[in-house]
Amino acid sequence: HALTVMAAVAAVVILIAALIVQTQQKAEIERQRNRLEAANHRLDQTRRVLVSLLSGAQASGKGPSATLGEVLQDAAHTLSVAPPDDPLTRAGVSEAVGTAMMTLGMVDKARPLLEAALAEFKDLPADSEPRLAVEAELAQLLYYEQKFAEAEPKLRELLRRERARNGGTPSELEGDLLNALGAVLRLQGKLDEAMTAQQEALVLRTKVHGPGSLPVAESHNNIASIHFTAGRYAEAAASFRASLAIRETRLRAGHPMVLATSLNLGTALLRTGDAPGARPLLRSAADGWAAAFGAEHGGIVSARTALGQALRRDGAYDESQNVLESALQWQLARGGPETPAVLATRINIGVTMAENAAGDCARAIESLESIRTHAQFPKVSPGLAAQALRALADACERCGRKADAQRYRDEAQRLTKPN
């Protein structure tokens, strides 16, 4: 009888256990179905939001002529007046639009969108990927706001949290954080620490994305920038070249990132003395800059100035002067004649005139002497000011003004003499 009772009890226990398992399985299936329905709803909402946002250019009547910045501003307005009802969808779209605005330099408009996204993610665990990602974007926003010292500790803490989350498995976010950390370290003059961070980012991004990926191209570009800042121009050129090779493969001709990297590589080659190698790169950047970045982008002056310098090094003085004059006219139309940047362009034009042995030395002297007595001349970098004075001395020498030539050479030497 006892055995029978025990068997009956065991059977009841097994039945109860089976019912519990079945109930749990049913509940889990229900939860999975709910999650799937929520995910489908979120995907549908995201699709609708994207269609609405990307059709903004058509709605405004601008069509293909609309700039990305205009489309993003329309997107931000749509989000403010007709946001998605799902909080996570709303957060994801706000993050995407805010991040795009940030990379275009629209920092004042990017911050509220990224902060709104973080507020929507506040109920997620602190180590969840969406929350970490938007916190990382806000830390990188400090870079665009030029708050480098403030960004550094935030990026280090986020990197620590991401490494704790991924448990040693390389992740896209870890590479992005290392990349951003390297950038803010470089701009604080911490070049060795910056190089360590960027090299770690390069190794990690190669594992995560592959050697021919755009994130890897970005890491090569940033390593090159550290070399360039340190005056290692040959090493900078090699890393810029690696970046350009990937970007030319992955992006269309004339893409802004291709032109910017061409400008960087050409400038590095120019610093190594390879003007012939720099010229085609700088010409492509100068010719395509307005179409890629817009006619008001200040990089037009950088591209034209670098091209003008390469042409001068190659002895193409007339073409160099024409290119530099076009840069000057762009500046004068937008900033007036009194800025140090305008004076720097005038110096490049004057140096070109002075180096042209077939040119008018008296005209070169007149140009450079007017620059030397300009109120903004003391604000020009010592290296560029010394270059102007040496060119002025050479022009004076050609025109037979030997005493003036010696005086200007002595002045140039004092400018570059260590304190």
Image (cartoon, rainbow, N blue to C red):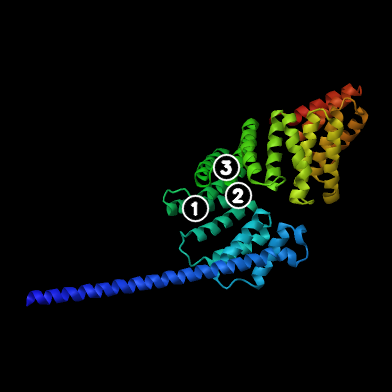
Residue 20, horizontal then vertical, whole percent:
29, 73
Question: For numbered disc 3, what is the local secondary structure?
Answer: loop
Residue 54, horizontal then vertical, whole percent:
68, 63
Going from N to C along the chain, the mark reached first, 1 or 2, is 2
| Disc 3 residue type (three-letter) | Gly
Looking at the image, do the residues carrying marks 3 and 2 touch, with CB atoms under 8 Å apart? no
The residue at 52%/68% (across/down) is 40
Q: Nearer the viewer, mark 3 or mark 2?
A: 3
Q: Nearer the viewer, mark 3 or mark 1?
A: 3
Residue 311, horizontal then vertical, whole percent:
80, 32
Q: In this rendered view, identify the residue nearer to me: 200 or 143.
A: 200
Q: Is residue 228 above or below residue 147?
A: above
Q: Is residue 106 above or below residue 211?
A: below
For residue 402, side relative to residue 75 (left or right): right
Residue 401, horizontal then vertical, whole percent:
90, 23
Q: Which residue is mark 1?
A: 157
The residue at 33%/72% (across/down) is 24
Q: Which residue is mark 2?
A: 148
Going from N to C along the chain, the mark reached first, 3 or 2, is 2
Q: Which residue is mark 3?
A: 212
Residue 145 in view (yes/no):
no
Task: Report how far apart the C-alphas of labels 1 and 2 lie in the structure.
Answer: 15 Å
| Disc 1 residue type (three-letter) | Glu
Tell me the quadrant of the picture where the C terminus can be found.
top right
Question: For numbered disc 2, what is the local secondary structure?
Answer: helix
Find residue 248 and report its image quarter: top right
Residue 179 in view (yes/no):
yes
The residue at 45%/72% (across/down) is 34
